[in-house]
Image (cartoon, rainbow, N blue to C red):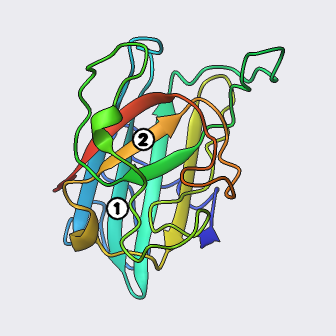
C-alpha cells in the first residue's frame, strides 16, 4: 500500500464535500466513488466520520476523516491499550448494535476474498493515529476495486492491529462502524 497522510489536508472542502482525488478534475467527480459514514458505538457515541473510496488506475484511493476518537491509553493490568486504532473493511454491510458491550458483530470478519493470512487481507488498512480525537489519512491499495466492497462495512477498533495475530490482528473492541455505499 502507498500511504499519503498529507495529500488531502489542503484539498478537502470545508463543507465536508467529496475530497479531490488524484486524476479528478473536480471535487464533484463521483464516478466510481463509494462512501461509508462512520458512527460510534454506545461506549464511544462521539465518534463520527467519513471514508471515501475512489477507483484510480491500478487500484483504489481511500480517504478517511474521523473525529471523537478516544485518547491513547497504554495497556495496564487487564485493560487493553486504547489507540492507535485498528481500521478495516469487514465482510458484511451491517452496523447493528445487538449487544452494547460487543457491538457490530454482524459485520463479520475482515474482508478477505483471496484467503490471505492476516496482515495481507484485502480489508487490512493502516492504523488510525489521532490527535485530540481527530484522525485524517489517505492511502492507495491495489487489493480491491469499488465494485468489490459495495455493501461491506468499515470498522474502527479500540486497539491497534498487530498485522500478525489470526484471524483479525488482536485489535480489540469494535468502536465505530459504517456501511460502504455507492455514491
Describe residue 159's horizontal placement relative to residue 72 as left or right: left
Using the image, tell me which numbered label, if any, was put on residue 53. Answer: 1
Question: Dot 1: what SS?
Answer: strand
Q: Local crowd at mark 1 within 10 Å, few (<14), some, or many (≥20)?
A: many
Q: Where, quadrant-wise, is the N terminus in this rendering?
A: bottom right
Q: Which residue is mark 2?
A: 155
Q: CA distance from mark 2 to mark 1?
A: 15 Å
Disc 2 and disc 1 in contact, CB within 8 angstroms: no
Using the image, tell me which numbered label, if any, was put on residue 18. Answer: none
Describe residue 136's horizontal placement relative to residue 115 as left or right: right
Describe residue 128's horizontal placement relative to residue 183 as left or right: right
Residue 155, compared with residue 98, is above or below; it is below
Between 152 and 56, the one nearer to me in the picture:
152
Q: Position of residue 94 (x, y in %)?
A: 23, 39
Residue 107, compared with residue 110, is above or below; it is above
Q: Position of residue 98 (x, y in %)?
A: 26, 20
Amino acid at each position: 500500500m502507498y500511504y499519503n497522510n498529507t495529500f488531502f489536508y489542503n484539498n478537502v472542502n470545508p463543507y465536508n464535500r467529496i475530497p479531490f482525488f488524484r486524476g479528478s478534475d473536480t471535487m464533484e467527480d463521483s464516478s466510481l466513488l463509494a462512501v461509508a459514514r462512520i458512527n460510534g458505538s454506545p461506549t464511544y457515541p462521539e465518534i463520527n466520520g467519513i471514508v471515501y473510496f475512489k477507483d484510480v488506475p491500478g487500484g483504489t484511493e481511500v480517504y478517511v476523516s474521523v473525529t471523537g476518537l478516544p485518547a491513547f491509553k497504554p495497556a495496564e493490568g487487564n485493560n487493553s491499550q486504547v489507540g492507535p486504532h485498528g481500521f478495516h473493511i469487514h465482510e458484511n454491510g451491517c452496523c447493528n448494535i445487538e449487544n452494547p458491550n460487543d457491538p457490530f458483530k454482524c459485520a463479520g470478519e475482515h474482508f478477505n476474498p483471496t484467503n490471505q493470512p492476516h496482515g495481507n487481507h484485502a480489508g487490512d488498512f493502516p492504523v488510525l493515529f489521532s490527535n485530540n480525537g481527530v484522525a485524517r489519512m489517505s492511502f492507495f491499495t491495489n487489493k480491491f476495486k469499488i465494485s468489490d466492497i459495495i455493501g461491506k462495512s468499515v470498522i474502527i477498533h479500540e486497539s491497534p492491529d498487530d498485522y500478525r495475530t489470526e484471524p483479525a490482528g488482536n485489535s480489540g473492541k469494535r468502536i465505530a462502524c459504517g456501511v460502504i455505499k455507492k455514491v
